Structures are given as C-alpha cells and as structure tokens.
Amino acid sequence: MLGVWTTTAVREAERPVLAATAPGALMRRAAHAVALHAARLLDRRTGGVSGRRVVLLVGAGDNGGDALWAGAFLRRRSVGVTAVLLAPDRAHAEGLAAFKRAGGRVGTPEGVDFADLVIDGIVGLSARGPLRPGAAAVVARVRAPVVAVDLPSGVDPDTGAVTGPAVTAEVTVTFGGHKPVHFLASARCGEVHLVDLGLDLPPPRFSVLSADDVAAAWPLPESGDDKYTQGVVGVAAGSSTYPGAAVLSVGAAVLATSGLTRYAGSAADEVRRRWPEVIATGSLGDAGRVQAWVAGPGMGTGKAARDVLGDVLGAGVPVCADADAITLLAAHPDLWDARDPDVPVLLTPHDREFARIAEPHGIGLGADRVTAALELATALSVTVLLKGHVTVIADPSGRVLVNAARSHWLATAGSGDVLSGVIGALLAAGLDPLLAAGCAAFVHVRAGESAARGAPAPASAIVSALSDAIRSVVS
C-alpha cells in the first residue's frame, strides 16, 4: 500500500534530515527534480526542450526558491525562463541569485500569455485558503500546462479542499512523502511524482491500494474450492418500484466471483430472468444461509423494509448497508439493537446519506472528508465507505483507505448498487471490511472506465464490464 502523510508529519520528519545536510542541498535536489519533470512535459507537449519558453510563478518562501532553482537548471538546457515575482521583497535570495546567474529574466505577468509551460511555486505546504487576488489574476491568464512544486497553489494540502481560485496542474512534483492533497484533489494535481528524501516517517494518515494490492487480496477459486467455500452472499434489495436496483446489485455480486448468490425480495422474478444462476426467493426466511448480506438498494423505507433490515442485522454475518438501509438506520436508530456488536457492518453513504446518519451524532461533512468518515466509523463502530469522486473508507480502529476516480463516469444512477454487490461478494469471501471496500472501490472505478470508453455509460454497462475489470487486475 502507498502511504500518505499529513504535512505536519512530513515536516517533522524533514527536520533531522535538514540538520544533517548542507544548507540548500535539499532545495537544489528538489528543484532538479522539478526541472527534470518540466523538461519531460515540455518534450511531450511540444516535441522539444531547447528554445521553449517557461514562466515561473514565484511566491515567498521555499516553494518559490524551488521554482527559481528549477529555472536555473532549465536555463542549462537552453530554455528561455522568465520569473514572475509575486512577492519581490520576499523572494528566496539564494534561488533568485542562482536564477539570474544562469541567465534567467525577471518579467511581468503578461509573460504567461506566451509560455509553453508554467512552474507553480506560489505557495507551499504551510499555506491555507485560496490564492490571493494578485496571484489569482496571474493564474487566470495561464493557458500552458503547469508543473506544481509540492502542490497546486490554492488547494488545501491536508484536505484537498478548494475554496476559491487555485492552480490546476498537469504534473505535481512532491518531496519526502505523499500528502493528502495528492489523492483528495487528484484532479488538481495531475501526475504526481515523489522525490524520496530518505525520511523516517510515522504511520501514515491514510493508505492507497495499488493494483498489486488488490490482486493479492482478491479471492480466486483454488482446486479444493466449491460454490460454498468461495463465499455465499445474500442480497436484500429492490422493490416493485425499483426492481433494477436488485438486478444491478445481484449481478455485481455474481460477477465479482461470489461462489453463490442468493436473493430475497419482491424483485425475485426480474432477478431470475437476468441472472438464472442466482437462487432468488421472495422473502428473507426462504433465502437460506449466507456468509454476508447486502441490504438497502431500492428496498424502500417502509415498515416491510425496516423489518427486513432488522432481520439482516440480526443474522450474525457481515452486512453491507447501502442506500435505503442507511436512511432507515438514520430514521430508526433502534434497528442497531438487532446487531451483534462483534459482527462487522459496512455503510456506503453518499454525502446526503452521510448527513442523515452522522448529524445526530454531531458529525458534519465539511472539507475534511477523512476526519468525518473516521468520526462516523468510531461513533457507530462500523466501517464507512464515503462515496464521491474520491472514495474515503474508514474503520473504527482508525485505518483509512482512499481511492480516487480518474474520471466522472461513475456518477450515474445505479452505480452505487453495483458497488454494494461487489462489496458483498468480498465480505462473503472473508475479506476484512476495510479491504473489501477498498478492493471493490478500486475495481468499480476500473469497470466504470471500461464501460464508458470516453462517453457516459449506464450502470448496467458497468456491471457488464466488471469481469474484464477484475481480470485486468488479477491476471
């Protein structure tokens, strides 16, 4: 897993390294990496480096110094480099001197109009809030690709929040360790490249799964397995009003390599027609034994649905509670009484569902989504998968996974029903809830991208793409 640290943790870890290193050495190393990635982006975008025009946006402090030193290195490759000093009286003195010695020029904001590439060194990790008006006016003129030093200026480094004018980078070069901004605001950061400084870092704020992590965790049948040993998942979803939710969630469970999928609900006929391999019944009592339940998608919020959810929570197996199940738990907290506190429950709210169930506990969903998910997980002793362009998964032990989508294709009706079915299959196979949610979110994104192929796609296409998405990861 890839670790991600708060800015405070990285700064603290930098102190002994800085103390043991010659003054300015780390800055020059960082700047050289910025220059290298800037040159690569220039070459990729314009077909060359020599003779191209680069503009540095230089603020006060070390990030401005990194940008100036990077400009000096680029001058050695015959790049025309101009620095726009946004705080001239506080520009990094050593970096500015090196930049001028290398033949760099100090220019005006109008210079960005003709740039082939811009290096963002406006603010560093200590900054909070949007760009100030002067910097925002310069950034508004930028049309060239941007390489950001450590983070895109104006984006909060620890929450990824954007509350006003901010930079959008095509490439971000960061140092020492990944910070939350690089995943919570991945669309702003573009490609992220880490320069290892050999820091002794504490446990991370959160982690990010790689394809290798998902492949290692994904349950695949072995020679001694049968349909029961691979995991039996039950799905209580759908209604006469929303039968499609049941079809989508069940289909996702089937294709996520569940050994056996059982369905209980009023959409049994529709489920059988689409998925003949599923054992579909009209009631929970007839469904048979399962090793995990998915409950909620399209099931409604009336008394019948409430009774079903109570039975699911009392079944003594892990539960993925989605959609209407979350609304029911928020409206009827006595439903929690049916749950064995030692049996895992995983909630999968979007923002509005999160507000419904979290606000009675005094938990608000502000800019810091990681903290909000952790607080709810702790308050309810559940694992929480907070949906969004960036999915945040937290459990009551304090562990957090983050999964960033690379597009907006999953923002479609029924997409969440698909995700819940995949999670249920993984829970039934015995995966830890945090890992089950993380692996499901990862594959869900892959399936969405595959289904879309550059254009919006419905949730049924996402279900159809699941097998290929899983194959692309595990093979």
Image (cartoon, rainbow, N blue to C red):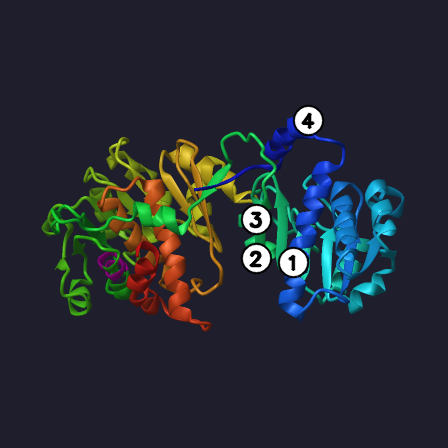
The answer to whether mark 2 and mark 3 are in CB contact below 8 A is: no
In this picture, residue 461 sits left or right of residue 114: left
- From the image, tell me which residue sits under label 3: 182
Q: Are marks 2 and 1 in contact (CB under 8 Å)?
A: yes
Q: Secondary structure at mark 4?
A: loop
Kindly report which numbered mark, 4 or 3, lies closer to the viewer in this rendering: 4
Which x, y percent locates residue 383? 37, 40
The Cα atoms of the two marked residues, 4 and 1, are separated by 35 Å
| Mark toward the start of the polypeptide (4 vs 3) | 4
- Which tag, 1 or 3, sits closer to the chain's start? 1
In the structure shown, which secondary structural element does the residue marked by tag 3 occupy? helix
Q: How many circles with numbers are drawn on the protein?
A: 4
Residue 255 falls in image quadrant: bottom left
Q: Name the residue: 31% across, 58% down.
A: 470
Query: Is tag 2's residue or tag 4's residue first in the polypeptide sequence?
Result: 4
Given the image, on which type of amino acid does mark 1 rest?
Thr
Amino acid type shown at disc 3: His
User: For the magenta stretch, what is the residue range?
Assistant: 249-254
Q: Which mark is residue 168?
A: 1
Residue farthest to the right, as pictured: 89
The image position of residue 181, as x and y in percent, is 58, 47
Q: Quadrant of the N terminus?
A: top left
Query: Can residue 293 be seen by looking at this rendering?
Result: yes
Predominant secondary structure, magenta span: helix
Q: Position of residue 219 (x, y in %)?
A: 25, 48
